[in-house]
Image (cartoon, helix red, strand yellow):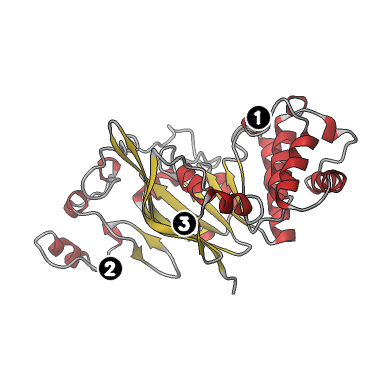
Amino acid sequence: MAETLLELSRFKMHFHTDKGVVKAVDGVDITVDEGEIVGLVGESGCGKSVTSLSVMGLVPQPPGKVEGGSIKLSGRDLTRLKRKEWQRVRGNEVAMIFQEPMTSLNPVFTLGNQMVEAIRQHKEINKKEARQLARETLQEVGISRDGILDEYPHQLSGGMRQRVMIAMAMVCRPKLLIADEPTTALDVTIQAQILDLMRRLNRETNTAILMITHDLGVVAEMCDRIIVMYAGQVVEETDARRLFRNPQHPYTIGLLKSIPQLDRRLERLYSIPGNVPNPRQMPSGCRFVPRCEHALDICREKEPPLFSLEDGHTSRCWLNAEEKEEADRDTTGNTAPSS
């Protein structure tokens, strides 16, 4: 059985602004095992990217502040690292690829210069050896043309730039690769190529992948396990097959209903009513209650815990309470059901 590589435990990242406190990530529990591919999904504004940036230590503090919990990578709490310690961790142990590589690559330096600099920050080798390693890594991601190291980012297509970013992230063989919407800006054909590449690297190197996306088609194809976030919290978690066959949280059900299907007769596409709540003004009770078609009275009064269902399936919804009557009695002052 694979060991746990990444573990976020009751982790909170809040932003303190002049207009109030933004609870971007509010008590999440997330694990990623060695060699596993985990999808983190949800609408924009649900806290996915802040979660990934927190794992990388890239959230500016202030205004961001860790208000509680921990982020452990191979047992070490990343929230306690100093700046110099982070420089050793990034690239060597955890790396990240972003949605738009043009904002990550420096436009005034060649790809070779950028890759050699990144390699020599982590490996004690000379420029010639670093350049050879860069060339070999580019070949691993399907870029083998002569002179590629002397080209600039603007000379490459979007798909080629994303391949370069994957090569830069993988060159030091990190234990964990975080991919934040890595295919959003690419056409469908190139998306498939990038996903195939990431799957192959996962198999060949046993690098775990945390895939941040709002595209359920991507997670269906890529992921072993799926975590659904809403308004800064995890609302459902299970393996990929079970999530698509038997979703439990109303938000997850709504996301799946909104996927266009070819076998349906022509009808208006479904969309979840309303919007993600203002993170400075969260509703009382369940955070999804203003948009939920199945809300109970208790949903408006008390925030639900994560209920454990079967085989590691969890859902943050009072509808999933094993004893509904006990949940209802809780509104009169009794003890809430255990999660």
Location of residue 162 by image quarter? top right
**How far from the left and from the top, in percent, is residue 82?**
51, 52
**In front of the other: 235 or 124:** 124
Location of residue 20 by image quarter? top left
Residue 80's disc is 3
Q: Residue furthest right?
A: 146
Q: Earlier in the sequence, mark 3 or mark 1?
A: 3
Residue 65 falls left or right of residue 198: left
**How far from the left and from the top, in percent, is residue 116?**
78, 42
Residue 102's disc is 1
Q: Give the mark toward the camera: 3 or 2.
A: 3
Residue 228 falls left or right of residue 210: left
Q: Earlier in the sequence, mark 3 or mark 2?
A: 3
Q: Amino acid at mark 2?
A: Glu
Q: Residue at x 59, y 74 (%)?
A: 1
Residue 8 falls left or right of residue 199: left
SS of the residue under disc 2: loop
SS of the residue under disc 3: helix
**How far from the left and from the top, in percent, is residue 316?**
33, 57
